[in-house]
């Protein structure tokens, strides 16, 4: 994946079924007949990406939510890259997201 | 002659006698639990008599002809196929389900004889038994596949308090021509009902021939390993079926019951049925 621009936003793949389980979430990707297990922080990244939130805001959100001493920049960027690789989210333009 | 009602989770099958055919030898198939909130289409299946044998075309088109044993086996195999096709993404766990004040308890084992003995014992003691066949797993919730309980002809010698269950129950013969009875798990004033709902406890049953019954806790990982070993997978959407099995294992307290004496097993299970904590304490496997 190319380096992530700060203003890059994403949209969730279509046909995803989310189910909460005691240790996180299961996402069933109907199109690929694949199942993904996400821990709670990965789910937060996924959901924020799905809502069109860009990486810097996600990093700030997680730092506040988990009261981290430093911004989880690398973790969030790696997580986003993995979500893109697995085709759970895909980059989109801000105008497309607003529509 | 009245048709035989054989209710599945998706269809209300009615076996209808044609000509000289008699449905009496197939009576063990009859299965009419109350399934709330399910609107089941009616499907008539004619049963004929050909050259002294029973003959029918199964709803999926397969033609079968033979004695009652062959027809019953063929019908049960059809139901397996039918359930597998109609529930993609759902695993089937061999289990019996009983509901008490503490919620639904799923008795899971690959040994149908042991499971049926336990289920018949619970039914004879007045507990609400939902089924004794396969549980369709949908995360932490299950639906029992409808089927009557199978009881051996010598049930009275194993549990005298359960002898009455055979009264009026239709009989059928197994592969070795052993006679069994098909028991409707209705209770007085409480019709047989199957609902979809959460599982309060998983109990994995292993035989302990001639010994005492002992029960201990199991870890979620051990429970998942057992479920994976025993479950039947659907024809399609296997990954989500596996995820649902894992969901059941990690969200439901699990116990291992070493099944020896029946009274001892009942003491353990009755504590779970009443909602009494964790049952007998034991090491987490």
Image (spheres, coloured by chain):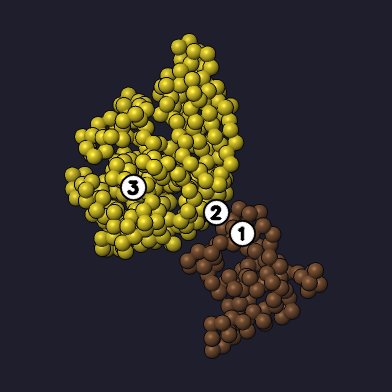
Chain colours: A brown, B yellow
Per the rendering, the mark at residue B240 is 2
Instruction: Tell me where residue B101 appears, x and y as whole percent.
Output: 36, 56
The residue wearing badge 3 is: B127
Say which chain tag 1 marks. A
The disc, 3 or 2, on the residue closer to the chain's N-terminal end is 3
Q: Is residue A13 left or right of residue B169?
A: right
Q: Quick one: A74 or B212, which is closer to the camera?
A: B212
SS class, disc 2:
helix
The CA distance from mark 1 to mark 2 is 10 Å
Rendered view: B71 above or below B39: above
Q: Are marks 1 and 2 on the same chain?
A: no
The residue wearing badge 1 is: A17
**Which dot, 3 or 2, sits closer to the camera?**
3
SS class, disc 1:
strand
Instruction: Tell me where residue B261 appears, x and y as whole percent.
Output: 21, 47
Residue at screen point 36% across, 41% down:
B188
């Amino acid at each position: 994946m190319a380096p992530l621009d700060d203003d890059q936003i994403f949209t969730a793949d279509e046909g995803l079924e989310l189910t909460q389980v005691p240790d996180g979430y299961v996402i069933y990707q109907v199109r690929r007949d694949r199942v993904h297990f996400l821990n709670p922080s990965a789910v937060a990244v996924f959901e924020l990406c799905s809502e069109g939130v860009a990486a810097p805001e996600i990093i700030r959100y997680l730092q506040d939510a988990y009261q981290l001493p430093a911004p989880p920049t690398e973790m969030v960027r790696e997580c986003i890259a993995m979500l893109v690789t697995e085709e759970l989210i895909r980059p989109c333009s801000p105008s497309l997201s607003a529509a | 002659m009245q048709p035989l009602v054989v209710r599945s989770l998706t269809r209300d099958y009615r076996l209808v006698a044609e000509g000289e055919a008699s449905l009496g030898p197939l009576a063990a198939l009859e299965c009419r639990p109350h399934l709330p909130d399910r609107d089941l289409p009616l499907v008539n299946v004619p049963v004929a008599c050909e050259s002294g044998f029973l003959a029918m075309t199964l709803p999926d088109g397969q033609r079968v002809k033979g004695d009652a044993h062959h027809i019953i086996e063929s019908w049960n195999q059809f139901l397996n196929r039918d359930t597998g096709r109609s529930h993609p993404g759902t695993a089937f766990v061999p289990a019996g389900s009983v509901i008490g004040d503490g919620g639904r308890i799923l008795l899971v084992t690959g040994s149908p004889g042991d499971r049926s003995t336990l289920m018949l014992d619970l039914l004879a003691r007045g507990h609400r038994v939902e089924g004794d066949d396969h549980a369709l797993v949908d995360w932490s919730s299950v639906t029992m596949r409808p089927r009557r309980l199978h009881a051996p002809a010598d049930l009275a010698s194993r549990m005298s308090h359960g002898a009455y269950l055979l009264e009026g129950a239709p009989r059928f013969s197994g592969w070795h021509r052993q006679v069994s009875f098909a028991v409707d798990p209705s209770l007085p004033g409480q019709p047989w009902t199957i609902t979809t709902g959460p599982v309060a406890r998983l109990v994995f049953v292993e035989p302990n021939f001639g010994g005492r019954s002992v029960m201990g806790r199991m870890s979620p990982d051990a429970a998942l390993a057992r479920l994976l070993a025993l479950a039947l997978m659907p024809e399609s959407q296997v990954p989500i079926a596996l995820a649902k099995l894992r969901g059941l294992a990690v969200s439901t307290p699990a116990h291992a019951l070493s099944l020896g004496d029946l009274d001892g097993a009942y003491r353990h299970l009755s504590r779970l049925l009443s909602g009494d904590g964790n049952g007998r304490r034991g090491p987490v496997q």
